Image (tube, rainbow, N blue to C red):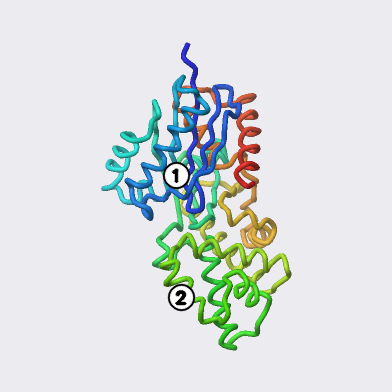
Amino acid sequence: MEKKYYLGIDCGGTKTSFLLTDEAGKMVSVHKGPPANYLVNGLSETAEMLKQMVAGIRKEEMHGEGRCICFLALAGYGDIPEEESQVDQVMKAMIPADTLMVGNDTENAIAGSLIGQSGIHLIAGTGSIGIGIDLDGNQYRAGGWHHLFGGDEGSGYWIACRLLEHFTKQADGREEKTRLYDLVMQRLSLKKPEEMLSRVIEEWNGSRDRIASLSRIVLEGAEAEDPVCRSIYREAAGELAEIAEAVAGKGNFGSSIPVSWSGGVFHSGGYLLDPLKESLPERFRLMAPFMGPAGGGVLLAMKADGHELGGDLLEMLRETDRRAEESLAG
């Protein structure tokens, strides 16, 4: 019988994760690629990068043998229904997988975190969104509106914008200077604060991903006990709590609602999670994700291929995903 491999691809604004397992859920390989948001980078360019990465994985890890069943998670997929069939056609024509399923990056995220339970999943990476599956199996979402409209609240981009807002006010003297001011000056190698405009607008061309990367400065400031940086996390937590409540208000989620999470913003740990827990009403309970998005993609690929997902297989996938997350974070 021909050997089968399962590949979960999670295309994020910061990186693209590739997790390959065998039929038992054991890790074969994990790889990190460049960001792959086709709405930003273009459909053809994104598909070409994915094609090269998957071809390399098939050659180096599968040795050109066996079947590759893949779930590809794309940010923004399905948001514009008229484009969905075109995205499907291009990806399936270019990516060398024997079976390729294309979905929104919320699908693998909630599949990995809640593994079929009802509940809510918050994503806060470059952008943000809340999704939920209620007790009747219906799926709902809130947030995720384009950042140009002031959306993506609580995301890395949103946090970075709050950082720059406070930086400009401190530069003007409208706010008292804190460690935040010095960190921005140092990390952007600015000689004077006005140079921030040319750096972000001219050099970076207002890149959403580059701006979102500045959210790391907020974590650095929070760790240095900067009160403004810590307040930014509290504000982000409040926004994410509102998104979770909005999702819950759309369906039948019961009296005890698990809330899980994924995305780079949550790497801030307690600076975000503690105020998030405080901001959520009592019927919501924070629950650490069972697996990350890449593992969720493998799970969906296996499910589509007819696997019974329980017991030992789930535990093996969980361990595989844990090792993959450690590797991707390194």
Q: Residue 325, located in which quarter of the rendered image? A: top right
Callout in the foreground (1, 2): 2
Count of numbered circles on the image: 2
Q: Is residue 268 above or below residue 59?
A: below
Q: Nearer the viewer, residue 215 or 258?
A: 215
* Residue bearing the label numbered 2: 198
Q: Is residue 260 above or below residue 323?
A: below
Instruction: Name the residue located 58 percent from the left edge and 22 percent from the top edge.
Output: 24
The 10 Å Cα crowd at callout 2, few under 14, some 14 to 19, many 20 or more, is few
Q: Nearer the viewer, residue 314 or 213?
A: 213
Amino acid, disc 1: Gln
| 38 displayed left or right of 175 | left
| 79 displayed left or right of 203 | left
Instruction: Name the residue located 54 percent from the left edge and 48 percent from the top edge.
Output: 120
Secondary element at image label 2: helix
Q: Position of residue 193 (x, y in %)?
A: 55, 81
* Residue bearing the label numbered 1: 139
Q: Position of residue 50 (x, y in %)?
A: 41, 40
Instruction: Name the residue located 60 percent from the left edge and 73 percent from the top edge.
Output: 184
Instruction: Name the residue located 49 percent from the left edge and 57 percent from the top edge.
Output: 128
Q: Is residue 99 above or below residue 12?
A: above
Q: Position of residue 291 (x, y in %)?
A: 60, 39
Q: Nearer the viewer, residue 107 or 283?
A: 107
Q: Nearer the viewer, residue 131 or 153?
A: 153
Secondary element at image label 1: strand
Amino acid, disc 2: Ser
The first of marks 1 and 2 along the sequence is 1
